[in-house]
Each structure stands twice: as structure tokens, then as C-alpha cells.
Amino acid sequence: MREPSPISSSARGVALTAFGVLLISPDALLLRLADVADGPLLFWRGVLTALGFACIVLLTHRGSVTQCLATVRRCGRTGLWVALLFTGSTLGFVLANQYTRAGNVLIILAASPLFAALMSRLWLGERQRLHVWAAILASLAGIALLVLDEAGSGSLAGNLLAVGCSLSLAANFTLCRTRPGSDMSPMLTLSGLLTGLCGLLTCVWLAAHGNESVLQQLWPSDSADFAHRAGWLALLCLGLSPLGFTFIQRGPLYLPSAEVALLMLLESVFGILWVWWALDETLSPRGWVGGGLVLGAMLAKSLMDRHLRRDTTDASALSS
């Protein structure tokens, strides 16, 4: 049998990654449509996501619980930190969408690879090229515009939560680089359970301070209406997110990470378009400038990385 050509392999990587990004792009929109309070939202998001990723892990290991547990054990202590950091990014993303524009959240989240490059320099001593530092500075300026655009309003907290989410993701990326070749995806199930626990504790705290009981918060009396709204969460957490991230995770098998990062920018673009189309929610003029700086910096960095990688490949081919 003939091996697949580089072109067909690259096309497969682009198709897998782009399809995965398209699946997860309605994330912010579906959270808005669910319209659930903070505690129940975190609980159901965490539990349903844990169930979805557990099903993916079981299917990957052909239903063998023993092999699944062995994979989890191989993640070691690093895997526990990965789960905690992913939990932090999930909490930040979910709560940020509760308190600020979805477009702001998605744009700030798009800067996480640049934060990861900065952390890699500080923690791992990895040297970064000049264009990476330029992209980091441009992104920080854009994020500052987004945050300042909401200064004095209640959504400032949402923008700061989005920054925390982006930093948690960046720390997660950096930590995973210390264990190259190790599959940390099973720890996403643990992260989902931790997120659900945070939601449950929030409900318990509210119940102890005179709010409705925990059960009433998790499943309100208007069960028919709540079931309809919770259906959006089920669609997202049981279907779109696990499948989307599974496809995205396959992308680097056929594409360099720089090109995968470039395609991940489509999540912010599609996500903003989904919210604009369904909820008529858009950015302010200052927000568009800030968003343009962040997305433009990410696009320029990814294209430069791609160009440099091709130059290196061509030079290696000529020397051999």
C-alpha cells in the first residue's frame, strides 16, 4: 500500500481540525441560551462534560476500564495539575460568559497560546523569536482595550474572569510541554468532576444563606422550562465539546502545531458570528479595535511560524 502524500495528509489535518473547531464554536452561544444560574450551570456543565469525555476515553480504549485506569495512572502528578488548571479555565470561561460579552471572552481566550509562549520563556527557559514578543505585546494591548472598555460596569469582572481563563489555559499548555508524548486527555474527565463539585458547593453555600435548597437550585420547580434550557447544555457537553476536542486532538497528527493554532482562531470568529446572529450581541467600537489587535497578532504569528518552519524544512532538504 502506498503511504499518503504530504498534501493529502495535510488536507486531512486541516479537515479534522476545522471540523472540530466548528463543533465547539457555539460554546458561548449555548451557554447564553441555557440561561442557568452560576451554581447549577457549573454543576451541570461539569457533570455532563465529565460523562462525555469518559465515553470518549472508553471508546478510545475499546471499553476496557483497566486500560483507561492505566492511562490515567501514567499521567501522574502532572495530570492532576492539568486537571486543576483545566478546571480553572472552565470556571473562568463559564462565569465570564455570564458577566460580559461573549465576543470579549472568545477574543481574550484566543490569546492563550501567546501567554503560553511567555510562560515557556519564564518557566522552561525556551527562547522566543522577536515576532512572538511583538505578537504578545500587541495582544496585551488589545486585551487592555477590551477590559478598559468595560471599566465602571458590571461586565469588567467578566473580562477579568476571561483573562484568568486564558492564563489557566496557557499554564496548562506549558505544563503539558514538560511531558511530551503523554496523553493528558483522560484528565479532562477529572476536570469535569471538579467543575461539577465547584457548582455543587456554590449551591450548598447559597442554600446555607437563605436561598432555595440545593435540589431546587439544581432542578427548579418549573422543570419543563428548565429541561428545555438544560437541553442546550446537554447538546454542548455530551455531544459538541467531546467530539470537537477529539477531532482537534487528532489534528496535530497530520499538521504542525503552528497550523493547528492558526485554525483555532476560527473558534473566536465563528463564536462571535454565532452570538451576533442568534442574540444580536456585538462588540463596541473600542472592543473591535482590541479584538482586531488580538486576532491580528495571532494570525501574523501563526503565518510567520509557518513560513519559518517551511524555510527550515527546505534548508534541511537541501543539506541532505
Image: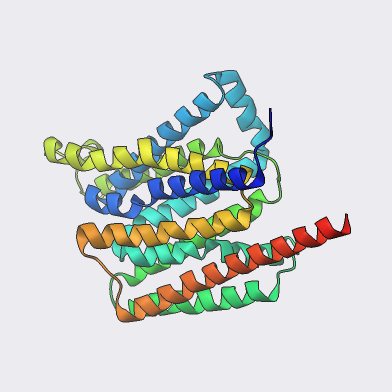
Of residues 10 and 44, the one drawn nearer to the viewer in this rendering: 10
Q: Is residue 200 visible?
A: no
Q: Where, by quadrant of the figure, is residue 225 drawn?
A: top left
Return the residue found at the far right.
320
Residue 33 position (above or below residue 294): above
Q: Give above or below for 163 relative to 15.
A: below
Please state, as top left, top right, bottom left or bottom right, where the C terminus lies in the image. Answer: bottom right
Front residue of this view, candidates 15 and 153: 15
Q: Residue 241, located in which quarter of the rendered image?
A: top left
Position of residue 45 measured from the top left corner of the image (x, y, whole percent): 35, 42
**Residue at the location (48% across, 43% down)?**
245
Q: Quadrant of the N terminus?
A: top right
Question: Which residue is located at x 26 percent, y 63 percent?
Answer: 276
x 58%, y 73%: residue: 136
For residue 261, above or below residue 81:
below
**Front one among 61 and 292:** 292
Q: Nearer the viewer, residue 255 or 88?
A: 255
The reply to whether residue 54 is visible in this rendering is: yes
**Residue 87 location in percent, x, y?**
48, 48
Q: How is the image coloured?
A: rainbow
